[in-house]
Image (cartoon, helix red, strand yellow):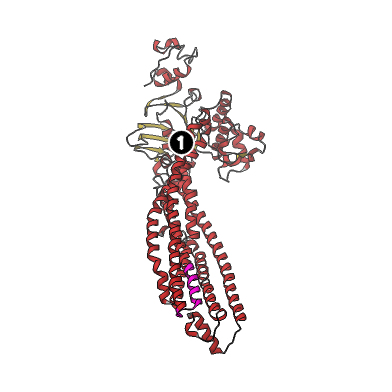
Amino acid sequence: MRRLLGYVVPYRWTAAVAIALIILSSLLQLVGPLATAVALDLFIRPFAGEVETLSTVSRWVAEEMVRRGLEVEPAVGLGIVSLIYLGSLVLTFLVLYWQGYIMQLMGQMIMFDLRREIFSRLQRLPVAFFDRNPIGRLVTRVTNDVDALNELFTAGIVSIFGDVVLLVGIVAVLFWLDWRLAIVTFAILPLLLLLTFWFKTRARRSYREVRVMLARINSFLQEHITGMSVVQLFNREEEALDSFAQVNDAHRRANIRAIFYYAVYFPGVELITAVGVGLILWYGGSGVVAGALSIGALVAFLQYAQRFYQPLADLSEKYNILQAAMASSERIFRLMDSPVEIASPVDAFRPDQIRGALEFRGVSFGYHQDEQVLHDVSFEVVPGETVAIVGHTGAGKTTLASLLQRFYDLDSGSVLVDGVDVREWDLELLRRSIGLVLQDVFLFSGTVAGNIRLGDQTIDEERLRWAAGEVHALEFIDRLPEGFETVVRERGAGLSVGQKHLIAFARALAFDPRILILDEATSSVDTETEQWIQLALDRLLADRTSLVIAHRLSTIQKADRILVLHKGRLREQGTHQELLAQRGIYYRLYLLQYRDQPELDSGVVSSTSSVDASTDSTSPRIDIS
């Protein structure tokens, strides 16, 4: 709670005004029953100066009238009292209006700050964090859990002051009116406290369960809506529906458990308060019959009792809000307390110019402690050199790219850029110096221009068109309905795979990185599109240090050097011709892709007949293990 209240500090004056208005509205609510008592005792009941039998407030008014020598007709007196009652109601309405408006305004500002802080934290967390946490769960933190906190700020914390002031005021007035009847009125408090204690111990647990199940629903929906094409392609609709029904049913049962506690608690509060009203009628009515209590005092007690029990129920409801907020805040703060394991050091390396020299020195790494992906990998890349990385799936090719961008930290060894370990670099500068084009190009909702600039307003219109023209994307962009301002839907829906790749290349060129990583950038396009992309690549790779990760060996034959990874180890390196001549892993990978061609490579392998009999084109049995 102390941590949550910290978000109110920037708006403390707004909260102070809201508290003042709430206190004022609570005091105004004390006026009505007092006015009712005066009206009954002095103007509806015949008054003949017998002040001893009047309620305290009526006695005080009557004494003032006698002292001042005032004689007020009953009709006139009722009119004055009615005006006072009406005035208090109007003032209460105005005060509650401004108090509600100010509280909601403050709640929205706090939600804005909190969501901004959570998203800022998410952007600084390492990639490994997102490997462990489903997207739907994180979305729940930023949406539903923050909404629960908004209710706490707008209808919980500050409003408690009003309820407390009202309760204290009612207690004081009741003891002023008649201390014996006041004790009878409060006789039911132990029962209310016991019921509330029973409720609170179970409410928090049920709120936690509901939040967990809601996060699972969001995670399931995000995953299956994103992969809907796969669900429909493999006719998995019924199976997916059954799985969703199970998750949805768990959420329903968790809610029903919470509803049960509500269903017991609030009728229980009503029953106990009804008992309290009955006690007032029994004891107070006996006093009225005996002449020890005025009818006005009894009616005022009944009205105050209702107003006293209502804030108690409100406090209990606010306790429910508090429990929901605690369950949500636990999850939010757990997210916000997740360590930012990868960050720039205090004295980070920030060179004025980047040459683009790369070195992997004895690099070993595993995503899990017991599963090493890379084993003692070492190689160098000189500035301006294009190095291709090949190997079977799982060999560690993409992992090398991730380590270079410091998405993960090494288990041992070091990755150096311009001779400095990436862990010593300023992280923002390091990543800005590296361009990345993936096999699955990610485009954001917005415009074509926005997806190339990515918010960098230093990339003007002229540079935008230049970058698109250099990678041969300008032709298709100009054909779009709005050109660069054409709206791009989520993940680039409506654009072909090749068009998305060309936009990604234009993005990389517009940012002009000194180091470029192409991770399977041409593996999912047709041959004609690949030719356009290859032309774009020729321009993109010029004068840059480049790492090209590829399965299709045809795309990397022009590389200055090729590295062959196998089971996390660097097994071979050299040019295309040198590796074919070695007849090692690269040679066998090449055979797998081109075994049906009569000539694999002029001057190196004349035909498949030159390979041993176990790898003939009709029944290839090539072992690359």
Query: Element type at marker 1?
Result: helix
Question: Which one is in front, 365 or 131?
Answer: 131
Q: Give the x, y percent position of residue 57.
A: 50, 80
Amino acid at pointer 1? Ser
When asked about the image quadrant of residue 417, the answer is top left
Residue that carries the numbered disc 1 in the rendered image: 243
Q: Give the x, y percent position of residue 97.
A: 57, 64
Residue at x-position 37% and y-position 61%: 194
Task: Give the magenta range.
Answer: 290-307
* 325 w.r.t. 12: above or below: above
* 171 w.r.t. 138: above or below: below
Classify mark 1: residues with Cα within 10 Å, few (<14), some (14-19) or many (20+): few
Question: Which one is in front, 578 or 524?
Answer: 524
* 82 w.r.t. 386: above or below: below
Quadrant of the snapshot with the C terminus: top left
Question: Which one is in front, 15 or 296?
Answer: 296
Quadrant of the snapshot with the N terminus: bottom left
Res. 368 in view: yes
Q: Give the x, y percent position of residue 243.
A: 46, 36
When asked about the image quadrant of residue 569, the answer is top left
Q: Give the x, y percent position of residue 335.
A: 42, 48
